[in-house]
Image: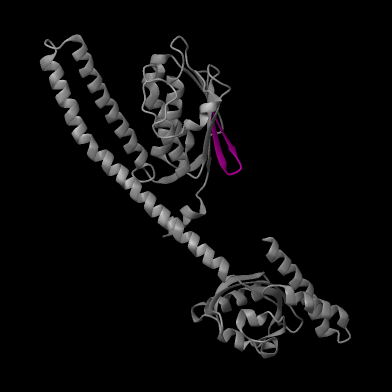
Amino acid sequence: MPTTYRYRFLASLALAHHAVCHLVKPHANWQAEASLRELAHHVPGVIYLYLLRPDGSSCFPYASEGIFDVYGVTPRQVVDDATPVFAVLDPDDLERIRQSIYDSAKNLSIWHLEYHAHHPTKGWIWLEGRATPRRLEDGAVLWHGFIADISRRKHHEAVLAEQARQFQASNADLEQFAYAVSHDMRQPLRMVSSYLQLLERSLSDRLQEDEQEFLSFALDGARRMDSMIVSLLEYSRVGRKTSPKRLLSTRETLDEALAFLQPDITQSGAVIRISGEWPSAYVSRDEMVRLFQNLIGNALKYHEVTDVPQIAVESRQQKNQWQVKIRDQGIGINPAHIERLFKVFSRLQARSRFEGCGVGLALCRRIVQHHDGEIGVHSEGEGLGSTFWFSLPLLQTEAEKAEDVC
């Protein structure tokens, strides 16, 4: 419970306890009552006692002056009958409020609700109430608690929700734009590559050595551009064109990725050790396979030619998180350059030494973010190997559950 609400709640408990004592003990300490009333005067909202009688009628035996700020009525107006309060409640919320009161009375559970009311000067406002019930000897139920105006908080929540919606819509538009541009760019690029190849075949015996080199540069540039566009297409598909999330065996996704990498594993003679606990997780199969392909593929690629890749893949479950580490003994990373690794089209190694277009790790980061996880890397420096890690929630998030219901 937030600090302010906890303060209000504790204050309400103290005042309500005293009020109950006053109801049954006429000679209660009036000085203490005055102090508690003064405290209630300074607490935002209303501190109150609400009584539900066995015949279904109700009243507020005690309510602080703050009830006027909440409902627009005075304590005297509701001391015998709560009807003036129910008269200002939103008709659309009324049945829900009555049912929540009934459930709290039946189970003697804490009553907690957010609802609308119409204040005579403020108009429609949002209220939040919380109260603890107690059954009396005659079968009535007495609650002591507080109600506060949360309209400002609800306004801020609505503004944030709208900003989030606009951001998601803008992000979706940008992703669709990137996908469309990338897809449409491939066709003219393929034509350029095709005609360059035709020129190379038809003019190969007539071109000077430097002219042939120029043509090779043009062809290589076209191929690299096509590779970058394909990578950009994959990047834009994450969360849009991939398989939906469902509960899967994480070990199966690793095995599928290793099957795709088998030619590279065989060619390099790599030794891959797999260990740890491999739980089931709520993930997209396509994206998990691609994540393992990229991370293990990098461990196979970035090593000295004379070395045999040594790779360790470790998995563990910690509470509701699935954590994976992929260690290699490859070329390592300068710690000063680690922040650049996960950016699109960012490369740390010369293309002449290692092929690639600099999208693989950016794609990994996007996949992990799509799963509400985290990704990172640790390396002591160049020549000292690297450890890439990621952590994902095992189960659906509340937002994902809400989307499934919708």
* 335 over 172 or under it: above or below: above
Direction from residue 346 to residue 125 in the image, left or right: right
Q: Is residue 105 visible?
A: yes
Q: Is residue 75 magenta?
A: no
Q: How many marks overall?
A: 0
Q: Which residue is drawn at 45% across and 44% down?
A: 370
Foreground: 251 or 147?
147
Direction from residue 303 to residue 13 in the image, left or right: right
Q: Is residue 255 visible?
A: no
Q: Which residue is drawn at 21% across and 32% down?
A: 189
Q: Which residue is drawn at 41% across and 19% down?
A: 265
Q: Residue at x 54, y 27 (%)?
A: 336
Provide residue 120's location: percent of width, then percent of height: 56, 85
Provide residue 173's location: percent of width, then percent of height: 34, 50
Q: Quadrant of residue 292?
A: top left
> Which region is colored magenta?
313-326
Q: Is residue 321 magenta?
A: yes
Direction from residue 255 to residue 35 in the image, left or right: right
Foreground: 122 or 364?
122
